C-alpha cells in the first residue's frame, strides 16, 4: 500500500489525522480493486458447467392466476397475472381497452374489469 509522501504532507496546511487515515483507506480500496481487476473471479472446476437452454427448452414458469378474493390489482400484479408486460398493459390503458382507478398516485385495475376484458378477448 502506498503512503503519504513528504510532498503530500507538506501540502496539507491543517493536518487532520482523520484525513490521512481516510486517504490510506481509499488507497487500500483502490489497490484491492486493482487486484480484483487483474485476476477476475473464476468458478471452481469441480462444479459442472450449466447447459444453456434454448428458447424452446426454457421451463415454463407458472403465472399467478387472478385471485378470486382480490378486488383490484396494481399494474405490476395485473401484468404478472395476465402474463403480459407492464408496457403493453399501459398501452391498453392509454388506448381505452382497460379502465383504471386512481387512488392518489396509485393506479389500480379492478378485478371484474380485467376479467371482462380477458373474456372479450376469448370471444374474439
Image (cartoon, rainbow, N blue to C red):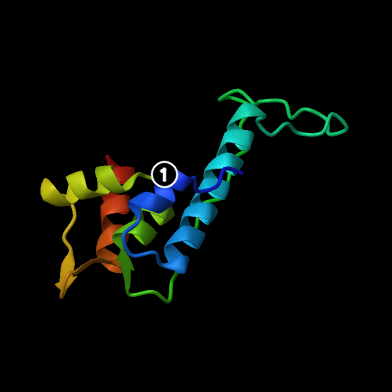
69 to the left or right of 91: right
Q: Locate the N terminus and report the quarter of the image it occupies.
A: top right
> Which residue is most to the right?
46
**Residue 54 position by quadrant:** top right
Residue 63: % across, % down: 51, 52
Q: Residue at x 18, y 44 (%)?
A: 91
Is residue 36 something one can see in this rendering? yes
91 to the left or right of 35: left
Foreground residue, 105 or 93? 105
Q: Residue at x 35, y 56 (%)?
A: 12
Question: Looking at the image, is 26 positioned above or below residue 36?
Answer: below
Foreground residue, 21 or 5? 5
14 to the left or right of 39: left
**Residue 46 position by quadrant:** top right
The residue labelled by disc 1 is: 7
Question: Looking at the image, is 68 positioned above or below residue 58?
Answer: below
Question: Looking at the image, is 74 positioned above or below residue 32?
Answer: below
Foreground residue, 80 or 41? 41
For label 1, the SS is helix
Q: Residue at x 47, y 67 (%)?
A: 17
Residue 53: % across, % down: 64, 26
Foreground residue, 104 or 37? 37
Q: Locate the C terminus and report the quarter of the image it occupies.
A: top left
Q: Residue at x 11, y 45 (%)?
A: 95
Residue 56: % across, % down: 58, 24
Amino acid at each position: 500500500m502506498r503512503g503519504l509522501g513528504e510532498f503530500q504532507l507538506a501540502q496539507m496546511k491543517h493536518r487532520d489525522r482523520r484525513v490521512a487515515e481516510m486517504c490510506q483507506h481509499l488507497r487500500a480500496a483502490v489497490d484491492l480493486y486493482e487486484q480484483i481487476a487483474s485476476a477476475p473471479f473464476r468458478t471452481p472446476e469441480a462444479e459442472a458447467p450449466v447447459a444453456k437452454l434454448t428458447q424452446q427448452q426454457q421451463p415454463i414458469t407458472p403465472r399467478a392466476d387472478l385471485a378470486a378474493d382480490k378486488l383490484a390489482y396494481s399494474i405490476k400484479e395485473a401484468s404478472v397475472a395476465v402474463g403480459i408486460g407492464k408496457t403493453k398493459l399501459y398501452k391498453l390503458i392509454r388506448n381505452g381497452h382497460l379502465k383504471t382507478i386512481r387512488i392518489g398516485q396509485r393506479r389500480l385495475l379492478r378485478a371484474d374489469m380485467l376479467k371482462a376484458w380477458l373474456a372479450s378477448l376469448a370471444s374474439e
